[in-house]
């Protein structure tokens, strides 16, 4: 027989169309065909047939199945089988158009991935030709709509892949013919508009390509209130620059994330895996929830299902460990940020507002068919923001999550006895298990069928090949005490782990219990050394002992060459309980202090190697632990990146355990790196946590330093409103201490805070005080340099370039920092800005080039982007427009990567200046308006005035007096409030008239 779902539901036999029955019969048939080969519960079929099932629903369903069997009996009397809980349709030798479509589409995608675009286009053309109209065209109802929507997303994905192949082949006629109806059917699919643009551009019709972008922009904004995403914007930019070609389709395709970790081999889970995968594959259940105790195998089952379903979700798979069973569950909005980055959203386009992140995430996932796997969910509130409006979702949790009303919930059961015995035999050997079958059966019963427990027992027995299984059975049966949330019958994982732990030597046991206090996902080898206060060789041997019995998992070497390890969450929980019960608090505190001292020693030295270290930590810092120090010194930035999560967690651990000084010192040592790499969420969180610890200790240098770090964090995030209050507290604490150097630092921050909010008079007052105080003989020379730099920056902001140049030349003269230090690079950057405004762009280029070299050498992405933009300003003043354009492209990419709004706005302002210099007034206005919007949003008044003044001049030159007048009123009003004159506008000569 030949079954058809890709159009009206139909059945043919020997070329003759068979009657397929009533609407309900056809719906039952379609549901069974979509999940062919898998058992469909009768209760599920009933809910698909009736919104409110009648009392006779089961009988009616039986009659419907009987009717289908009668119709197809002559062709295959065994087509539909009855199972204890439902029905299964065995496709066998019969043909299903959906199966053929998926097979051809999968082969076409594989051919495209291998670069064989001719074969891909042919295969996908055959796949798409199988469609006779809308899927299930003659069926109505919510369930039919769900299946239809799922299948149509698959059809769209295949059509898009075919269009990409055609573009790669230069077959623009095919793209023209086939993309237009797809756009009509899918008016919000940005990727289709992009293909239309590439087709037109590839055929040499640039204006037509840009017209497509404008239509897409209006449709998206007018209908659903969102602007085009980065993929479509980038296509427009490339076309404007004259760069796109037909062959770019494959290389610039949207990212297809494949984030699922490698699954472990499953034992005894095939029926459940089939059912879960079948529900998601057919679109019958868009959200699947796997619940059960820890160690039951939920994650392994979810990963196995996700990998099996890869062909059914061609647009990718997203994965997140939500850490719901840990003390610090993942913030769903931080998870959304990671997902959006994987989907191609750059930092500049990342919404700060949580609800906007949710909206953007769902919009992205609505454009294709994607699977989202959310592992170890804490509660419904954590999961809901991560649920897309389409595609498939797999959630695992220890909790029932009863409020997820639309999810299909599967309670993952313990392994059946025969499956658990197979798992045990896989660890100890089939022959050994066969010798003592009763003992093996009793062991797995006492383990409650939990895969984790069985694996741990198997590992322990494997290490002792001469131990009878019955001896371990007796010990399991006698064990008492349970992990509260993981009870299965009268035994649980705690008892099994305790058996492995009790067999350890005293020092291995001590190390194991202390590892339980770690709150980070994984850790390097030196952590074991300091927790145990043991030589590296001894710690390594003990870790090997723990790894052998599966109490600790070895993760291999990380990117810095360090061996890394982790504890399974259940094992870690057991270790924490035993550590709290067995080890005296004083010993625990000493171990924690050694651990935090190790982190602090490494972080403080790494901070020094980065340049411009924090200093003044307020605690004694010994030499860092050996293996960690070697990895850190071999590559500071790579080490910081690898250990960032552990370092951030260590700040919280110090705070929770009352080691307040360590919390503050560690946060301060991290401050430089987190700021340098623009990890501003971690930066702000660690500083707030540390300040809360240190503030109750009273005024001290560490508090001043931490407040200074928080000030810099707000500044980097373009959060200007909090700056005066933070600077005022810092200055107050410094003056109470009577520390002249700290007072100078605080005066600088107080003055610069006033600059940022546009109060130049107060700014000059604070900054002149800082310079006068810094000239005292008892103050470090670096503070005079920094104070002169800050006063110069304020003068530059106010438009007094001559004063700024003089102050910066004095600052450079007293600068004693190494030539390659970041602080000197910042000084040269400010000097370059002042020289540009002073009419000396060639001199500015020399200063800025030196600053750029330093930024690139130390990996300062944010600083590099700012300097590139300043160099572009110098090029514009010198009439070197192609060079300026190239620099601005790099600056724009850098600021988007880092996500710094002010830097992005400065680059857009410079792009507006370049366009105005070249006579491209419309583009100049567009760039300047974008910059103006950003500066208005962050409250940067001087910059708002500068953008408005430029728009005033350009609008007036274009004859738009009304717009010019509005902009003129705005910038004049701002300057009046700032007590500044027109020089503060920093207008280039060609706009200054």
Image: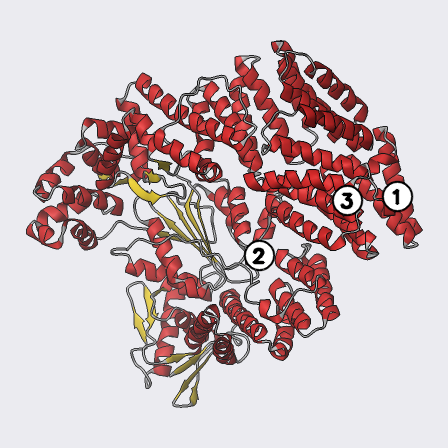
User: Please, is residue 296 above or below residue 307 in the view?
Assistant: above
- Residue holding disc 1: 992
Residue at 55%, 25% in the rendered image: 614
- Across and down, in percent, residue 913 comes to 79, 49
- Across and down, in percent, residue 290 comes to 38, 51
- Residue holding disc 2: 364
Residue at 83%, 55% in the rendered image: 921
User: Please, is residue 101 above or below residue 213 in the view?
Assistant: below
Q: Which mark is residue 16?
A: none
User: Please, is residue 119 above or below residue 391 in the view?
Assistant: below
Mark 2 against mark 3, which lies toward the viewer? 3
- Across and down, in percent, residue 509 comes to 23, 29
Give the distance between the C-alpha atoms of the residues marked 1 and 3, in whole angstroms: 19 Å
Q: Report the front residue among 271 and 555.
A: 555
Residue at 51%, 79% in the rendered image: 125
- Residue holding disc 3: 932
Q: Within the image, what quadrant is residue 749 found in?
A: top right
User: Please, is residue 965 above or below residue 651 in the view?
Assistant: below
Q: Within the image, what quadrant is residue 191 found in?
A: bottom right
Secondary structure under tag 3 reads helix
**Disc 2 residue crowd, few under 14, some 14–19, many 20+, Cα 10 Å:** some
Q: Is residue 194 toward the left or the right of residue 101 in the image? A: right
Give the distance between the C-alpha atoms of the residues marked 1 and 2, in whole angstroms: 44 Å
Give the distance between the C-alpha atoms of the residues marked 2 and 3, in whole angstroms: 27 Å
Indicate which disc, 1 or 2, sits on the residue closer to the N terminus: 2
Secondary structure under tag 1 reads helix
Is residue 671 something one can see in this rendering? Answer: yes
**Disc 1 residue crowd, few under 14, some 14–19, many 20+, Cα 10 Å:** few
Q: Report the front residue among 142 and 381.
A: 381
Secondary structure under tag 2 reads helix
Label count reads 3
Residue at 29%, 18% in the rendered image: 584
């Amino acid at each position: 027989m030949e079954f058809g779902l890709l159009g009206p539901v139909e059945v043919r036999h020997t070329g003759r169309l068979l009657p397929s029955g009533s609407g309900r019969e056809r719906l039952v048939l379609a549901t069974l065909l979509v999940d062919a080969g898998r058992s469909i519960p009768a209760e599920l079929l009933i809910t698909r047939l009736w919104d409110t099932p009648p009392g006779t629903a089961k009988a009616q369903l039986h009659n419907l199945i009987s009717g289908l069997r009668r119709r197809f009996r002559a062709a295959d009397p065994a087509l539909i089988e009855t199972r204890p809980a439902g029905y299964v349709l065995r496709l066998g030798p019969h043909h299903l158009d959906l199966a053929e479509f998926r097979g051809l589409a999968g082969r076409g995608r594989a051919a495209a991935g291998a670069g064989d675009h001719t074969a891909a286009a042919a295969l996908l053309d055959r796949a798409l030709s199988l469609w006779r109209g809308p899927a299930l065209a003659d069926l109505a109802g919510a369930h039919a709509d769900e299946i239809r929507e799922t299948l149509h997303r698959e059809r769209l994905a295949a059509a898009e892949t075919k269009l990409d192949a055609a573009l790669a082949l230069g077959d623009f006629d095919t793209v023209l013919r086939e993309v237009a109806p797809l756009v009509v059917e899918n008016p919000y699919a940005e990727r289709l508009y992009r293909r239309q643009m590439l087709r037109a551009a590839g055929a040499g019709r640039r204006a037509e390509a840009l017209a497509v972008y404008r239509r897409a922009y209006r449709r998206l904004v007018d209908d659903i209130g969102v602007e085009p995403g980065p993929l479509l914007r980038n296509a427009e930019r490339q076309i404007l620059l004259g760069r796109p070609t037909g062959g770019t389709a494959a290389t610039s395709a949207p990212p297809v994330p494949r984030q699922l970790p490698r699954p472990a081999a499953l034992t005894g889970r095939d029926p459940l895996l089939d059912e879960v995968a079948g529900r998601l594959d057919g679109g019958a259940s868009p959200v699947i929830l796997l619940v059960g105790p820890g160690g039951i195998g939920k994650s392994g089952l979810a990963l196995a299902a996700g990998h099996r379903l890869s062909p059914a979700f061609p647009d990718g798979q997203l994965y997140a460990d939500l850490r719901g069973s840990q003390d610090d569950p993942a913030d769903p909005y931080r998870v959304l940020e990671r997902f959006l980055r994987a989907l191609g959203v750059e930092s500049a386009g990342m919404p700060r507002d949580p609800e906007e992140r949710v909206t953007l995430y769902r919009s992205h996932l609505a454009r294709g068919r994607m699977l989202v796997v959310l592992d170890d969910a804490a509660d419904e509130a954590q999961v809901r923001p991560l649920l897309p409006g389409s595609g498939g979702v797999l959630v695992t949790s220890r909790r029932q999550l009863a409020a997820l009303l639309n999810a299909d919930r599967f309670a993952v059961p313990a392994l059946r006895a025969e499956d658990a015995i197979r798992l045990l035999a896989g660890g100890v050997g089939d022959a050994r298990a066969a010798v003592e079958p009763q003992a093996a059966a009793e062991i797995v019963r006492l383990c409650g069928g939990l895969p984790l427990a069985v694996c741990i027992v198997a590992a322990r027995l494997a290490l002792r090949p001469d131990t009878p299984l019955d001896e371990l059975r007796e010990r399991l049966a006698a064990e008492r005490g349970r992990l509260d949330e993981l009870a299965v019958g009268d035994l649980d994982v705690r008892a099994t782990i305790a058996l492995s732990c009790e067999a350890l030597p005293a020092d291995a046991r001590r190390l194991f219990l202390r590892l339980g206090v770690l709150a980070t996902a994984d850790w390097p080898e030196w952590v074991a050394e300091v927790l145990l206060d043991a030589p590296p060789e001894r710690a390594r041997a003990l870790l090997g002992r723990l790894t052998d019995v599966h109490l600790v998992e070895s993760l291999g070497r990380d990117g810095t060459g360090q061996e890394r390890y982790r504890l399974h969450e259940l094992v870690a929980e057991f270790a924490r309980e035993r550590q709290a019960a067995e080890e005296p608090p004083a010993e625990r505190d000493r171990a924690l202090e050694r651990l935090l001292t190790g982190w602090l020693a490494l972080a403080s030295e790494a901070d020094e190697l980065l340049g411009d270290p924090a200093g003044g930590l307020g605690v004694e810092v010994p030499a860092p632990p050996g293996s960690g120090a070697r990895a850190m010194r071999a590559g500071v930035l790579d080490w910081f990146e690898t250990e960032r999560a552990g370092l951030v967690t260590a700040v919280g651990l110090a705070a929770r355990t009352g080691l307040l000084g360590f919390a503050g010192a560690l946060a301060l040592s991290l401050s430089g790196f987190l700021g340098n790499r623009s990890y501003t969420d971690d930066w702000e969180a660690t500083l707030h946590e540390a300040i809360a610890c240190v503030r109750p200790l009273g005024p001290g240098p560490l508090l001043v330093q931490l407040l200074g770090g928080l000030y810099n964090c707000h500044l980097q995030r373009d959060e200007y409103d909090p700056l005066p209050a933070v600077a005022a507290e810092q200055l107050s604490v410094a003056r109470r201490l009577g520390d002249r150097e700290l007072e100078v630092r605080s005066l600088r921050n107080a003055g610069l805070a006033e600059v940022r909010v546009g109060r130049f008079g107060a700014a000059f007052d604070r900054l002149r005080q800082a310079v006068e105080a810094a000239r005292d003989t008892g103050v470090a020379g670096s503070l005079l340099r920094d104070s002169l730099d800050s006063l110069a920056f304020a003068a530059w902001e106010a438009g007094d370039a001559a004063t700024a140049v003089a102050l910066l030349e004095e600052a450079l003269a007293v600068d004693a920092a190494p030539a390659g230090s970041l602080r000197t690079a910042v000084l040269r950057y400010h000097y370059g800005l002042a020289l540009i405004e002073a009419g000396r762009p060639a001199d500015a280029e020399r200063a800025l080039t030196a600053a750029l070299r330093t930024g690139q050498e130390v990996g300062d992405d944010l600083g590099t982007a700012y300097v590139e933009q300043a160099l572009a300003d110098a090029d514009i003043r010198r009439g070197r427009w192609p060079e300026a354009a190239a620099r601005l492209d790099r600056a724009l990419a850098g600021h988007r990567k880092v996500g710094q709004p002010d830097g992005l706005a400065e680059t857009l302002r410079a792009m507006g200046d370049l366009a105005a210099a070249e006579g491209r007034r419309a583009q100049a206005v567009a760039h300047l308006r974008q910059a103006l919007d950003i500066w208005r949003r962050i409250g940067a008044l001087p910059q708002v005035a500068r953008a408005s003044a430029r728009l005033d001049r350009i609008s007036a030159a274009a004859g738009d007096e009304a717009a010019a007048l509005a902009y003129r009123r705005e910038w004049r009003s701002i300057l009046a409030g700032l007590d500044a004159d027109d020089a503060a506008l920093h207008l280039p000569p060609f706009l200054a008239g």
